[in-house]
Amino acid sequence: MRERRPKVASAAIEEAPEPASENGLAAARDRRILHCDMDCFYAAVHMRDDPALRGKPVVIGGTPEGRGVVAAASYEVRAFGVRSAMPAARAKRLCPDAVFLRPDFGRYRSESAQIFEIFRQFSDLVQPVSIDEAYLDVSGVWRDYGSATELAKRLRARILEERGLTVSVGVGPNRLVAKIASDHDKPDGLTVVSPRRVGRFLAPLPARKLPGVGPVTARKLSSLGFETIGDLRKETRERLEQLLGGYGGVLYRYARGIDERPVRIDRVRKSLSSETTYARDLATEAEVRAEVARLADGVAASLEKRELSAGTVTVKVRYSDFETVTRSLTLSAPTSEASVLRSTALVLLARTDGGRRPVRLLGVGCSNFMHGSIEQLRLFSSGT
Ligand SMILES: [Mg+2]
């Protein structure tokens, strides 16, 4: 069921609806993108479910006694200087009263599925960015709410009412502006940048707010006298390209708030696998093991490329008589690391007759994905 809100005359102040038109310019004027980013997602889920944790400094990740790192930190503990990817032991020194909790990925995944269900009631065009972050293209539907602002308010209220969680939302004419806006008033914020306010909104912000400007580029820009996005706007495209190569041209457009990247409905992939049917049956255990290792490496490379981590590994073996078996294992923490995938696949292979019976097909697959923050996941899954 699509969310519908009765139209309220006073809701249309910021964006007075204009008559719809076939004209491309009108279509561009109507473009509204939301960037929705759950606030402190992992910690927020634990704090919602356990009232004793509310208002407390909460750290999700490894234990301070082990070598684990912080995967997520509540706003209360961030006030002590605790940050993601910091060793848990250091977090403990900064905030001795912090409560340390082990991550519970199954819980985050099912929570995420329910939140995305709500997102999809506001738009058919939902692009997941990570487990707790998405772009929504609401160009075709915001008028039903009177304004995009009103739509965003409804969405935030629904998430709070139904899931007991807060989400920061940025609204803009494109992904670039929406993304910067959602971060503008975090946590529990709503920042709406109407098309005509884009220039004024971006100009005073530091250049590092633009996508692709990491610490290295930011330092380089600063040494050239570019501190704010407004500074970048004063420069010609030629000069920026001279300084930064191809990215200079992108930056020239971003600094003007121009971004035509579409919101893509990449349905989150459910599984990924690599299979080979052999021209001649594999007869020795060494051959079969070497092939499984090779296939696992291929899967690891695909995960890396898609910035995914997998929680479950599956091995498929088809014997020469066409009998086919699969074996699966769910890991304690999702991974994209080749060595982990390879050793897991070999453990699974050992639970088959592959190598003792001739094999005509082998496959290694994985599923149960998590999007994003691969680095953090890898860091703390190797700790404690
Ligand atoms: Mg978030």
Image (cartoon, grey):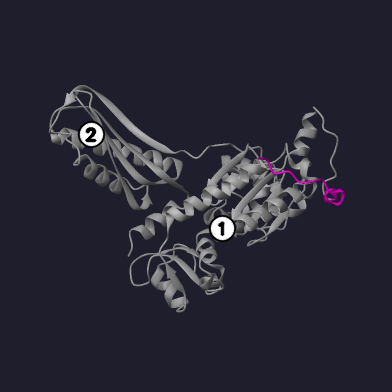
Q: Position of residue 211 (x, y in %)?
A: 59, 49
Q: Position of residue 215 (x, y in %)?
A: 53, 57
Pointer 2: what residue? 291
User: Magenta residues, as a range?
Assistant: 1-13
Q: Who is closer to the viewer here, 143 or 284? A: 143
Q: Is residue 270 left or right of residue 259?
A: left
Query: Magenta span has 206?
Result: no
Occupied quadrant, residue 355? top left
Q: Provide the major secondary structure of the magenta segment.
A: loop
Q: Is mark 2 within 8 Å of ligand 1?
A: no
- For residue 288, above or below residue 38: above
Q: Name the element at disc 1.
A: helix
Q: Name the element at disc 2.
A: helix
Q: Position of residue 12 (x, y in %)?
A: 84, 48
Dot 2 or dot 1, earlier in sequence: 1
Query: Magenta span has 4?
Result: yes
Q: Who is closer to the viewer here, 213 or 42? A: 42
Q: Is residue 239 visible?
A: no
- For residue 96, above or below residue 10: below
Amino acid type, label 2: Glu
Q: Residue at x 38, y 60 (%)?
A: 380
Amino acid type, label 1: Arg
Q: Is residue 195 left or right of residue 226?
A: right
